[in-house]
Amino acid sequence: MKSTWTVPENDIEFAELIKTSMEVLGSRYVSGGTDPATGVDCSGFVKYVMAEAADLEMPRTSAQQAAMGTARAPEEMRVGDLVAYGSSLASVSHVGIYIGDGRIIHGDGTGRGVTVSAWNDRTDIPRIANVLG
């Protein structure tokens, strides 16, 4: 499934990240997966997109990814920021990429695969991180 997304004007430099993310929208969820052709989990999706679109090598797990970069407040979020989910930073169990308009794209393990959701659908958000600088 392919889709388009309007990149916010102040984040136009991250258009390639949005494009790459949308190219794998609908890929199936596979625990431990890192290749959209065969399936990805949340951190595998982040690792793939950041490598392809930003030439940024990410660690493998959501907890490791959440610890990267600089913390950012919700009102300061920008396209490409990582939104981590879990009861604390030490127990992060899910991660997604902010794509603007109050949305993240992520590998959803509830059967939807790579999908777009509201970033604050969950309240257990220990960290938002700017990993792109």
Image (cartoon, rainbow, N blue to C red):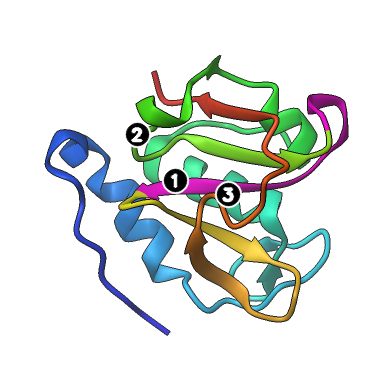
> Which quadrant would residue 67 be assigned to in this image?
top right
Q: Residue at x 53, y 70 (%)?
A: 115
Residue 98 in the image, given as x and y percentages of width and height: 44, 45
Q: Amino acid at mark 3?
A: Gly
Where disc 1 sits, the SS reads strand
Where disc 2 sits, the SS reads loop
Q: Where is mark 3, residue-wise?
A: 96
Q: Where is mark 2, residue-wise?
A: 78
- In the image, is 25 to the left or to the right of 100? right
- Bounds of the magenta segment: 88-99
Q: Amino acid at mark 1?
A: Tyr
> Is residue 63 depicted above or below 45 in this figure?
above
- Is the residue under label 1 in contact with that under label 2 (CB below 8 Å)? yes
Mark number for residue 98? 1
In the image, residue 90 lies in the stretch drawn in magenta: yes
Q: Residue at x 38, y 58 (%)?
A: 20
- In the image, is 110 to the left or to the right of 20? right
